Image: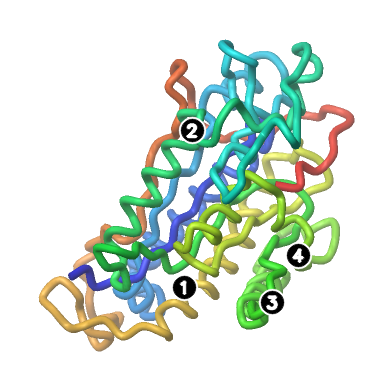
């Protein structure tokens, strides 16, 4: 039986949100570096929780924003009804895209489209997340053959410095935890303060076809949310990437502590006890429990350099 809980982190779902992939990579890198340096807290957390990530999901769309249209949001589907907003394509009970949105009528209208596709999981990117989540859940310590679970799920977007969380009755404990996460982000060691206060948003959790609502609705976890990173626009200066990564890291640490504190793994040769997490362990070995994977696009290659953008006017928050 697997001996760890699981956290899945997805980045770069919307092409124009350039700060998302490098923020996820920064968070993962800091976890791994602290583990290698013998940080007692991080070692304890990663001995109890697997962190698995897809830092750049919308590879083809991201590449298009680098070469052509900076504010492009959806994927790069060129067949059927055209580009699809990946974060409206996840299956839910009663999913029916035709009742909610129409396909874009032109390239101009496709740039910021929220069209949710011809069918649930019609897109290679959403299928990649579905399969990644399902495979990760199979390894979760609390999963059974008939019921797969995740410890938590975070979908990382920009912009607006807030965290989307369930508004459902009975989820007061979830909202309390996520409030602690945004408080940690607000206190992160940054060079440039965020342009506004970090806060919790419950209204956007009900967006049909969104990945966080899907993981919740499918029964994987109640600890599902969307992070909207710092900024007042999709374009953010490169010198704020580290600050954005620090804020995400601070939130993830709070989430990992919650998962670790509420789970006691059986002690095995592959699951060290907490006593082995001291600074005396100088092996420098890095666990498999913090890892990043590739994106989900299959319509062509792309890059995942996740660089900061230059100045472009206009734009508004994607709201997930």
First in sequence: mark 3 vs mark 2: 2
Local crowd size for mark 2, using a 10 Å CA cut-off: few (<14), some (14–19), many (≥20):
many
First in sequence: mark 3 vs mark 4: 3
The spot of residue 108 in percent (x, y) is: 80, 15
Residue that label 3 marks: 169
Hey, which residue is sitting farthest front in the picture?
A: 94
Whether tag 3 and tag 2 are in contact, CB under 8 A, the answer is no
As measured in the structure, the alpha-carbon distance from the residue carrying label 4 to the one carrying label 1 is 22 Å
Image: 288 above or below 187: above
Residue that label 4 marks: 202
Residue that label 2 marks: 125
Local crowd size for mark 4, using a 10 Å CA cut-off: few (<14), some (14–19), many (≥20):
some
Q: Is residue 259 visible?
A: yes
Instruction: State which mark lies toward you, 3 or 2.
Output: 3
Q: Which mark is residue 256?
A: 1
The spot of residue 301 in percent (x, y) is: 44, 18
First in sequence: mark 2 vs mark 4: 2
First in sequence: mark 4 vs mark 1: 4
Compare residues 77 and 120 and report the one nearer the observer: 120
| Residue drawn where x is 75% and y is 31% of the image | 101
Residue 233 shown left or right of residue 66 in the figure = right
Residue 81 shown left or right of residue 131 in the figure = right
Whether tag 3 and tag 1 are in contact, CB under 8 A, the answer is no
First in sequence: mark 2 vs mark 1: 2
Report the coloring of the rendering: rainbow
| Residue drawn where x is 77% and y is 66% of the image | 198
Residue 210 shown left or right of residue 6 in the figure = right
| Residue drawn where x is 75% and y is 65% of the image | 202
Local crowd size for mark 3, using a 10 Å CA cut-off: few (<14), some (14–19), many (≥20):
few
As measured in the structure, the alpha-carbon distance from the residue carrying label 3 to the one carrying label 4 is 12 Å
| Secondary structure of residue under mark 3 | loop
């Amino acid at each position: 039986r697997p001996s760890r809980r699981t956290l899945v982190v997805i980045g770069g779902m919307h092409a124009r949100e350039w700060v998302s992939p490098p923020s996820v990579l920064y968070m993962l890198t800091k976890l791994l570096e602290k583990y290698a340096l013998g940080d007692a807290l991080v070692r304890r957390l990663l001995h109890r929780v697997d962190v698995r990530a897809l830092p750049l999901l919308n590879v083809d769309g991201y590449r298009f924003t680098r070469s052509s249209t900076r504010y492009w949001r959806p994927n790069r589907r060129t067949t059927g009804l055209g580009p699809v907003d990946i974060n409206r394509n996840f299956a839910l009970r009663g999913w029916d895209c035709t009742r909610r949105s129409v396909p874009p009528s032109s390239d101009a209208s496709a740039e910021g489209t929220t069209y949710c596709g011809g069918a649930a999981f019609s897109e290679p990117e959403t299928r990649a997340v579905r399969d990644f989540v399902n495979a990760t859940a199979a390894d979760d310590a609390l999963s059974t053959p008939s019921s797969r679970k995740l410890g938590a799920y975070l979908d990382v977007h920009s912009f607006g410095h807030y965290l989307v969380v369930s508004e459902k009755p009975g989820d007061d404990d979830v909202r309390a935890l996520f409030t602690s996460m945004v408080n940690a982000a607000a206190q992160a060691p940054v060079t440039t303060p965020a342009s506004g206060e970090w806060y919790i948003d419950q209204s956007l959790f009900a967006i049909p076809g969104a990945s966080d609502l899907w993981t919740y609705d499918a029964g994987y976890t109640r600890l599902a949310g969307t992070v909207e990173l710092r900024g007042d626009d999709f374009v953010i200066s490169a010198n704020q990437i580290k600050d954005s990564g620090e804020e995400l890291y601070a939130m993830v640490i709070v989430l990992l502590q919650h998962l670790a504190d509420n789970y006691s793994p059986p002690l095995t040769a592959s699951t060290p006890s907490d006593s082995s997490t001291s600074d005396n362990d100088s092996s420098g070995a890095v666990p498999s429990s913090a890892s990043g994977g590739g994106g989900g696009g299959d319509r062509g290659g792309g890059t995942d350099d996740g660089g900061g953008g230059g100045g472009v006017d206009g734009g508004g928050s994607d709201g997930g």
